[in-house]
Image: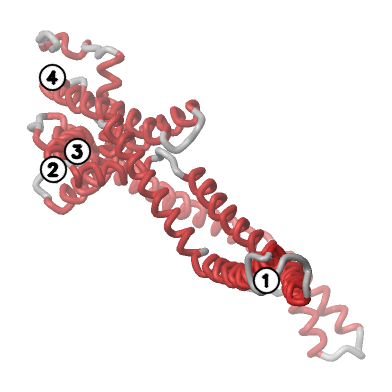
């Protein structure tokens, strides 16, 4: 608080540089406020609220840009820039609130809604900073869920072609398996016939054994031909299945590159965290309300603080400046009119003098033209008149 100063010494009051800075923040006019003793402290208070909001806005915007840019220098620079914009908006809001429009609800409501909107957004980065650990944990859980969902989407995307390939592969293998079973059975019959354990019961290569050998060799040859024909199809089928598996793995790997802890991801994690934790919801909304009040502080302070002599002086000074401006315009108009009138009068005198001085000379010139016309008998009067108009008569100004 400033000490009381005697009336005879009040004009010597010099505010400190910091006080002048606070007055600038509160949009007060130093030349008028310096003589309003009570209002000096009021506008310092308003300036402090603007300063606190400015610092808070700069911090929150800097943290916000830290979550979306890689350069710390760029994040700080952008945070300072956005903080300056918020400062400009706050100064514009409180500049419009005066003693004479505090009772007008429409401007006050508009300023309140604007400050409320800015405050709501500014509260988000601050809340993210305060619940950083919990949000990071929830973000990791959300990212795992997103990975599972993405895996399911990729499997569903390639399900139909993969099933078709597996079905074709199984059909080929089943056909080869049936043929292989026939070959193995023919081989067993042949071997049983040769060792006497089956068929005719005779040991050695006999007619029946030869017949079974021929049947076995025929089936084996058919199996080899079938295997040779279907092996490229099996290889192609295996390659296609492997390619699908690689595509699924690549899709999962590419998806992992987009998982992050950015601002929107953190906001989503915060929303999920609030859904799963009712005890956190009340504290969250309380914190948001408090942070919004920080943005609303300049408007609230300017609105609720009583008005003193400063507003009256500002209004009277503005009316005086308007009156002086109107008086100056009127005087300048009168001077211009006087200049134009005097210029007209003097120009009229000059024109009269010009015609008076050239009166006799014009008559002499007319006599000269008349004598010349008289001597030239071939020229008509109309021709003489046309020449006279061109040489003697004056032309009207446009």
Picture quadrant where residue 377 is located: bottom right
Q: Residues within 10 Å of mark 1 (few under 14, many from 20)?
A: many
* Residue in the image at 67% along x and 66% along y: 196
Q: Nearer the viewer, mark 2 or mark 4?
A: 2
Q: In the drawing, what numbered circle is on residue 186? A: 1
State the SS at label 4: helix
Q: Mark 2 vs mark 4: which is more N-terminal?
A: 4
| Tally of numbered tags | 4
Quadrant hosting residue 42 = top left
In-image side of 370 versus 283 (left or right)? right
State left or right for residue 379 relative to residue 245: right
Mark 2 = which residue? Answer: 278
**84 is higher (above) or lower (below) than 18:** below
Mark 2 element type: helix
The residue indicated by pointer 3 is 288
Q: CA distance from mark 3 to mark 2?
A: 16 Å
The CA span between labels 3 and 4 is 37 Å
Q: Earlier in the sequence, mark 1 or mark 2?
A: 1
- Are dots 3 and 2 in contact, CB under 8 Å? no
Q: Nearer the viewer, mark 3 or mark 4?
A: 3
* Residue 316 visible in the shown view: no
Residue 106 point in image, percent of width and height: 16, 53
Residue beneath the point at 51% across and 29% down: 71
Q: Is residue 382 left or right of residue 49?
A: right
Q: Quadrant of the N terminus?
A: top left
Mark with earlier residue (3, 1) = 1
Q: Secondary structure at mark 1?
A: helix
Helix, strand or loop at mark 3: helix
Mark number displayed over residue 37: 4
């Amino acid at each position: 608080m400033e000490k009381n100063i005697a009336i005879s010494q009040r004009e010597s009051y010099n505010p400190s540089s910091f006080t002048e800075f606070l007055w600038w923040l509160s949009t007060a006019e130093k030349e008028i406020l310096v003589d309003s003793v009570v209002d000096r402290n009021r506008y310092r208070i308003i300036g402090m609220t603007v300063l606190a909001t400015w610092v808070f806005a700069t911090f929150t915007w800097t943290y916000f840009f830290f979550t979306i840019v890689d350069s710390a220098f760029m994040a700080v620079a952008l945070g300072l820039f956005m903080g300056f914009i918020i400062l400009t908006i706050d100064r514009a809001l409180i500049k419009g609130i005066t003693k004479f429009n505090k009772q007008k609800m429409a401007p006050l409501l508009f300023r309140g809604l604007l400050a409320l909107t800015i405050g709501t957004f500014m509260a988000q980065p601050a809340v993210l900073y305060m619940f950083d650990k919990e949000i990071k944990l929830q973000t990791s859980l959300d990212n795992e869920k997103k990975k599972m969902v993405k895996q399911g989407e990729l499997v569903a995307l390639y399900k139909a072609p993969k099933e078709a390939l597996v079905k074709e592969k199984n059909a080929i293998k089943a056909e080869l398996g049936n043929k292989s079973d026939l070959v193995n059975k023919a081989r067993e019959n042949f071997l049983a016939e040769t060792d006497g354990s089956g068929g005719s019961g005779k040991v050695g290569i006999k007619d029946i054994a030869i017949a079974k050998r021929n049947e076995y060799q025929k089936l084996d040859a058919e199996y080899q031909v079938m295997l040779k024909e279907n092996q490229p199809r099996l290889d192609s089928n295996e390659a296609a299945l492997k390619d699908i598996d690689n595509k699924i793995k690549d899709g999962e790997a590419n998806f992992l590159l987009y998982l992050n802890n950015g601002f929107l991801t953190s906001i989503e994690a915060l929303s999920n965290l609030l859904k799963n934790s009712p005890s956190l919801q009340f504290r969250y909304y309380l914190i948001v309300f408090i942070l919004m009040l920080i943005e609303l502080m300049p408007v609230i302070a300017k609105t609720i603080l009583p008005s003193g002599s400063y507003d009256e002086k500002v209004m009277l000074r503005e009316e005086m400046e308007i009156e002086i401006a109107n008086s100056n315009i009127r005087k300048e108009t009168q001077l211009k009119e006087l200049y134009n009138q005097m210029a007209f009068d003097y120009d009229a005198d000059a024109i009269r003098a010009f015609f008076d001085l050239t009166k006799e000379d014009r008559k002499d010139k007319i006599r000269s033209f008349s004598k010349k016309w008289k001597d030239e008998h071939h020229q008509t009067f109309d021709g003489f008149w046309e020449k006279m108009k061109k040489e003697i008569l004056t032309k009207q100004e446009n």
